[in-house]
Each structure stands twice: as C-alpha cells, then as structure tokens.
Image (cartoon, rainbow, N blue to C red):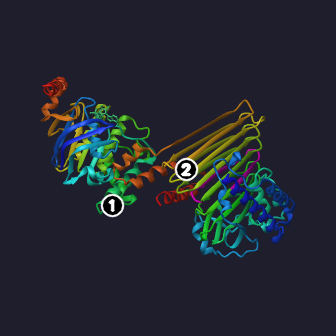
C-alpha cells in the first residue's frame, strides 16, 4: 500500500539521519551518552509509526516522507534578538526563554529578576549537573515510543527549570520554542526538563511559533516534569505554528505525594500536531488536571493522546478536552485512564466535547478506561455536534453578523477550557489570544 | 412601514401561511390573536428571517425595502425586533457582552460610533430600570437558567436596548404572573412614542388591558380572517374562537 511505502521510506530516511547526525556531530550531551546511544538503537528498531499502529490509526505521518528533513546542526548560530521575540511574551513581566531551532538562545532570552531558588538555563550547559542527570531522559520512556527515542537520540539542547524546595514564583516562566527556517526542511529536537522540589509552586508556559521563510519542519519536543511532594505546577502549552509544521510533543509528568499539576494544551496552529501527555500519579493524594483545546481549520490534523496513570490511592484527576474543527481538518482525542490495583479511592473524570463546523471536518474520540481497583469513582463522556443553529439565529436576530455570531458561540464553547487555568493573568491573556484566533 | 402582500409560506413542505395580507403604519399597535397552530409564530419567524421557513410567494416591504431578501442581521439592523416565544439559552455568553456586541453592530451599520464599555454600561443601567432587571442578570449567560418570566423580561430588555422601529412580540405574556405581565407591559408602553410600531401576538385579552392596541386581527389557517378594534379582543375573550372558525370553515366549504 502506498502509505506504508511512504512511511517506510520516511523511516529509513530518519534512521540514516540519526546515524549521519551522530557521526557528524558526535554526542552533545556527554553525561547522557549511553542513554542517547541506546535511544538511537531503539529508534532504528521501531522506525516511524504507520497508521497500522493502533496509537496512530487516525494520524498519518506520511508527510514526513515528502521532504528530506535535515536535523539542525547543534552548533548553529541563533539569529533572533530580544526585540524579535518581545511580542511572544504572554504577560509584561514574563520570564522569557527562547529556544531557536532547538538551541537555547541566551541573548534573546529575558530572565530579568529571576526569583531566588529558581534556576533556569540551557540544557546543554546544565546536562552534567547531578540534579539534571538524576532526571533527564529518565522519565520519558522511549522503549516503545519511537518519536521519543528519536528525540532522545538527537537532543543537544533545550531548557532546564529547577525550583528549589519552598520556592514560589507567580511570574510565568515562558519557554518560547521557535522554528526559524529559511526554506530548507528541518528536523528540530527540543528537550525540556522541569523539576519542582518539595513545596515549590510556579507557572510554566511553553509556546510554539514559526519564524522566517515558510518551510517544512518536524519539531519533536519531549518534556519531563518532575513534581516532588506538595509541589504545585501550572503548565500551559500554546501551539501556534504555521501549517508547514509537523509537531510531535511528548509530555511526561511524574507526581509525588500531595502534589498538584494542572496542564492546558491549547492547539490552534501547526499542520499536523500530535500531543502525548503521560501523567503518572505515583503516590497518594495527588491532584491532576488535564485540559485541552483544539481549534482546527483547513487541512490541519490535531491529535491529543493522554494517559492518566493512577498508581496509588486517594488521587484525583479531571480531564476536559474540547475541539472546534472546521474546513477539512481532523481532530483526534484518545484518553486513557489507568487505575492500578493499589489505587483505591481514585476519582478520575474525563470529558471530550467537539463541534464540527463543516461537513468535511471530522473528529475521532476514544476514551479508554482500564480499572483494576474496586473502590473508585470514574466517569467519561464524549460528544461531537454542530454549532447551535437556534443560538446562531437568536444572535443574528439581534443584529450580530453571521461571522461574529459564530465567533461568539465558538468563543463561549472554547473559553470554558481556558477559564479553568488557575492563574488570573494568564487566563485573561489567553482568552484575548483565543478571541484573536477566532475572529481572525 | 410594514406591508405584507399575499404571503404564502411553508415549513417542512407544509403550507402554513396561505395568502396573508397585513399593513402596519408608524406608531400603530396591532394585536394578532388566533387559535394554537394558526401560524402566528410562523409569521413572526418569516419576518425575522428564520431559514427553516420557506416563502413560496408574496412580498413583504419594510420602509420601502424588500424584507425577504435581507439576512436576519440586516433586518434587525433595519429596525425589526422579534421577542421570541421561546428565548434561546446561550451558555458562556454573558447577557451584557451579547448586548454590547449587538448594540455596537447595529450602531456600526448605521454609521454611528460604537459605545465603549462605560457608555454602554450607562445606557444599560437606564434600560434595566425599565424592566426592573437586576445587575446579576446581566452578568449571567444569556437566558441560561432563567425562569420563564425572566426570559420574557430579558426579551423586553433587549428590545429597549436595541430601540427597534418595529417590534414583534410573540406571546411575550404567556407564562407570566400578573406582576411580570405589568413589568413587561410597562416596558413596552415606555417605548411607545408615536413612531415605533408593535405587533403583539397573544392568546389572551389580558395583555391588551395593559398594551392597548389600535387594531386587533384574528389569524386562522394562515390568513387574517377578521380585523377590528380592541373590542374584538374582548369579544374573543368572551366567546372563544369557535364562531370565527365556523364562519371561515363554512365559507370555504360553500
Ligand atoms: N419548525 C417547524 N417544523 C414543523 N412544523 C412547524 C414548525 N413550526 C411550525 N410548524 C407547524 O406550523 C403550524 C403553525 O405553527 P405556529 O406558527 O407555531 O402557530 P401559532 O404560533 O399560531 O400557535 C403548526 O401546525 C405547527 O405544528
Ligand atoms: Mg406561537
């Protein structure tokens, strides 16, 4: 079949690229050398998944065979300056760190007034630090995830955020991941490590953007977030790249007892976007929120795969994903919830709601609950419908033009996801961004 | 102002309006009464531009313009307001935000400056008094969780904000207790200024004690079968519709 031929050739192409890259540039993270070598071997074995793979049934990576993606040179020079990226900062006081084509761009970053107890820096610089070594590439398991293996094999830089015990930082820490291209197809690995020590509390915003000449890009992001006892992390991903971008994102969270995490994945850019969230509630009394929003049009494919893994008793998880799909776009939501044998008194909830704005738009939803404990409360629900015609007519009958009436209804539907964000400033800014996106 | 000629309209292939003629002049208040299912809401929907209702023939002009060729929003901007028999709930859109958008779109279409938040708030507070609306209601999502009476009051509030030239009230009185009825009627009467016209669709004479009509019509089987003054409403209240039905049905059979 033609798709599998395409995928075979793209897999081969990437396998050669991995070898070639490692020959050319050697191993850039010496402290992680054996992990990276191992990952390269795993990737060579797994290849690029085809739609025959159960987890990739609705999302074809065939696009990767259409271009010859060169992996970025780890010693490339960054060209963006502070003024180029100023408009990306979500709030005025945001601590903004820039990753340009996979590389930490210190001169464009603006970490003014970094609170004591927080360390932020280039992953390449910090990879040898024992606190980084303890975690880096140790949480995002690549043994069965070929794209995580690919990222792990090729990673040369990114960002590390470490918050010491009891550090509180309300000012958002923003990582702007920028693909800055000049016509050539690029494969860009990006690696992020976030460590919240005991009782630390902070906000991280990971934003994704396209700069330069429109070019095919594979941006492959792996984030590891380690949350110690009683720490609280509010994490936001805002994906707003151009439609030449194929974005694969693997986000692993490991939660210790009494910890809290809230993640919002807001996806309204990119040609093909695949998000894998894997949240491990690894001890008692954890609270975890996973919210997501897809706004897709044209031929965009936006896929959210989530895994909430309840390993221990008395934890709570709540998941709300919404999608507005227009044009020929495709949405995918796959939500797995595991409740392990020991995870008694688990409360786990999941909801997925979608609106299809055109006849050619589609949505595939699959909730998967696997429950091995007996004293639990779990529920899931999924709906896919059309815009409420009655409401639309009501608005128009009051003089509101059709386009703005639709935007108003879509905004109300989508805002629900952003309203849940536990930070008033970020919430307000993101609601404005949503408005701009919907009224565009 | 409004002139309807030989209007034939259907919904789901079923003819509901069967050659309706009707004329409204500036400042007039017309009551339309008639048994259930006679086509009153269909008429209101056709005038507001609801797309499920297909116009088969006939013309409607509004201030010289061909109304049936206009989009629902353009009709509203031109000054037509329909108070819905069943107002729609819109979760997530606050009443205030909804109305600000509507008022400003209407103003823009007339080449007027849009109102900023402060100016809008001032106008809103004035009009809220008119229908004894409290602030909390303006912050809530449009009609969501409103009682029947609150929904109807909200329709009149919207009418007051949008200042239409022709308001069509579709059974705004149904389900209202006497206090709510008084509030709604006061709202309407406050907007009667000799130029603005009203079409009041109702089942009961009761409302017409408060909103006194210039003309009363009976709609039956898709046509206006009888017209008169406010005394006609009293007669209908007393005798019901059977005598009219008989009159019409026998003349059709003849
Ligand atoms: N959306 C619709 N779909 C199908 N039938 C309808 C619809 N709206 C109205 N009708 C029918 O048209 C006729 C007139 O209804 P309506 O105009 O609501 O009457 P009234 O308001 O006078 O009670 C009724 O027989 C009703 O069942
Ligand atoms: Mg009716």
Name the residue that disc number 1 marks. B108
Tell me the subunit letter for badge 2: A
Name the residue that disc number 2 marks. A419
Q: Which residue, as the protein is rendered here, is positioned at the far front?
A: A1
Q: Quadrant of residue A430?
A: bottom right
Which numbered mark, 2 or 1, is in the foreground of this view?
1
- Pointer 2: residues within 10 angstroms few (<14), some, or many (20+)? some
Q: Is residue A19 above or below residue A278?
A: below
Q: Position of residue A94 (x, y in %)?
A: 62, 64
Question: Is residue A75 rendered to the left or right of residue A421?
Answer: right
Question: Is residue A207 rendered to the left or right of residue B59?
Answer: right
Residue A165 seen in render? no
Q: Position of residue A417 (x, y in %)?
A: 56, 49
Tell me the subunit letter for badge 1: B
Name the residue located 19 percent from the left edge and 37 percent from the top edge: B31
Question: Is residue B65 rendered to the left or right of residue A423?
Answer: left
In front: B162, or A62? Answer: A62
Q: Find ligand 2 in the image and state its quadrant.
A: top left
Ligand 1: does it lie within 8 Å of the C-beta at label 2?
no
Q: Is residue A265 magenta?
A: yes
Q: Position of residue A387 (x, y in %)?
A: 46, 46
Residue range (magenta): A249-270
- Pointer 1: residues within 10 angstroms few (<14), some, or many (20+)? some
Under circle 1, the secondary element is helix
Q: Quadrant of the C terminus of chain B?
A: top left
Q: Are marks 2 and 1 on the same chain?
A: no
């Amino acid at each position: 079949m033609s798709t599998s031929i395409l995928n075979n050739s793209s897999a081969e192409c990437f396998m050669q690229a991995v070898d070639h890259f490692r020959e050319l540039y050697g191993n850039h993270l010496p402290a992680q050398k054996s992990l990276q070598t191992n990952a390269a071997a795993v990737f060579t074995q797994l290849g690029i998944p085809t739609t025959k793979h159960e987890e990739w049934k609705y999302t074809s990576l065939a696009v990767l065979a259409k271009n010859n993606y060169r992996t970025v040179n780890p010693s490339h020079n960054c060209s963006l300056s502070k003024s180029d990226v100023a408009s990306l900062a979500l709030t005025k006081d945001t601590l903004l760190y820039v990753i340009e084509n996979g590389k930490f761009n210190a001169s464009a970053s603006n970490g003014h007034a970094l609170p004591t107890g927080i360390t932020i820096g280039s992953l390449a610089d910090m990879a040898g630090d024992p606190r980084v070594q303890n975690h880096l590439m140790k949480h995002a398991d690549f043994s069965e995830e070929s794209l995580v293996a690919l990222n792990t094999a090729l990673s040369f830089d990114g960002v590390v955020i470490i918050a010491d015990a009891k550090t509180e930082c309300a000012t958002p820490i923003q990582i702007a991941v920028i693909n800055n291209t000049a016509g050539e197809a690029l494969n860009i690995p990006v690696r992020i490590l976030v460590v919240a020590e005991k009782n630390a509390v902070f906000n991280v915003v990971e934003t994704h953007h396209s700069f330069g000449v429109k070019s095919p890009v594979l941006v492959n992001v792996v984030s590891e977030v380690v949350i110690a006892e009683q720490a609280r992390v509010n994490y936001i991903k805002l994906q707003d790249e151009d439609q030449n971008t194929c974005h694969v994102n693997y986000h692993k969270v490991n939660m210790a007892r009494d910890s809290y995490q809230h993640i919002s994945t807001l996806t309204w850019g990119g040609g093909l976007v695949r998000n894998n969230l894997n949240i491990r509630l690894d001890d008692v009394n954890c609270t975890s929120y996973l919210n997501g929003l897809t706004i897709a049009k044209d031929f965009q494919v936006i896929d959210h795969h989530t895994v909430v893994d309840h390993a221990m008793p008395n934890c709570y998880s709540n998941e709300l994903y919404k999608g507005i799909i227009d044009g020929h776009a495709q949405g995918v939501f796959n939500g797995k919830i595991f409740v392990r044998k020991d995870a008694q008194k688990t409360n786990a909830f999941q909801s997925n709601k979608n609106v299809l704005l055109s006849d050619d738009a589609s949505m595939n939803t699959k909730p998967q609950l696997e429950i091995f404990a007996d004293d639990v409360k779990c529920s899931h629900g999924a709906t896919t419908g059309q815009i409420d015609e009655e409401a639309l007519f009501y608005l128009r009958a009051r003089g509101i033009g059709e386009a703005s009436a639709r935007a108003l209804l879509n905004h109300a539907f989508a805002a629900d996801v952003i309203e849940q964000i536990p930070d008033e400033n970020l919430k307000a800014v993101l609601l404005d961004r949503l408005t701009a996106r919907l009224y565009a | 102002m409004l002139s309807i000629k030989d209007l034939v309209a259907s919904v789901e292939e079923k003819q509901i309006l069967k050659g309706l003629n009707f004329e409204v002049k500036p400042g007039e208040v017309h009551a339309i009464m008639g048994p259930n299912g006679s086509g009153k809401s269909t008429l209101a929907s056709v005038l507001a531009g609801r797309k499920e209702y297909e116009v088969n023939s006939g013309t409607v002009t509004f201030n010289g313009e061909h109304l049936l060729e206009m989009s629902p929003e353009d009709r509203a901007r031109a000054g037509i307001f329909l108070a819905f028999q069943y107002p729609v709930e819109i979760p997530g859109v606050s009443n205030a935000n909804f109305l600000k958008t509507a008022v400003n779109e209407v103003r823009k279409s007339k080449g007027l400056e849009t109102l900023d938040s402060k100016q809008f708030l001032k106008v809103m507070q004035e009009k809220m008094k008119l229908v004894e609306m409290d602030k909390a209601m303006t912050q809530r999502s449009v009609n969501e969780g409103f009682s029947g009476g609150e929904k109807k009051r909200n329709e009149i509030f919207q009418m007051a904000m949008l200042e239409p030239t022709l308001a069509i009230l579709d059974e705004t009185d149904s389900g209202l207790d006497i206090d709510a009825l008084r509030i709604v009627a006061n709202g309407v009467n406050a907007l009667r200024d000799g130029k603005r016209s009203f079409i009041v669709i109702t089942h009961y004479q009761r409302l017409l004690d408060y909103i006194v009509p210039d003309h009363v019509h009976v709609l039956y089987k898709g046509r206006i079968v009888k017209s008169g003054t406010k005394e006609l409403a009293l007669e209908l209240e007393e005798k019901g519709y059977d005598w009219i039905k008989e009159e019409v049905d026998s003349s059709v059979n003849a």
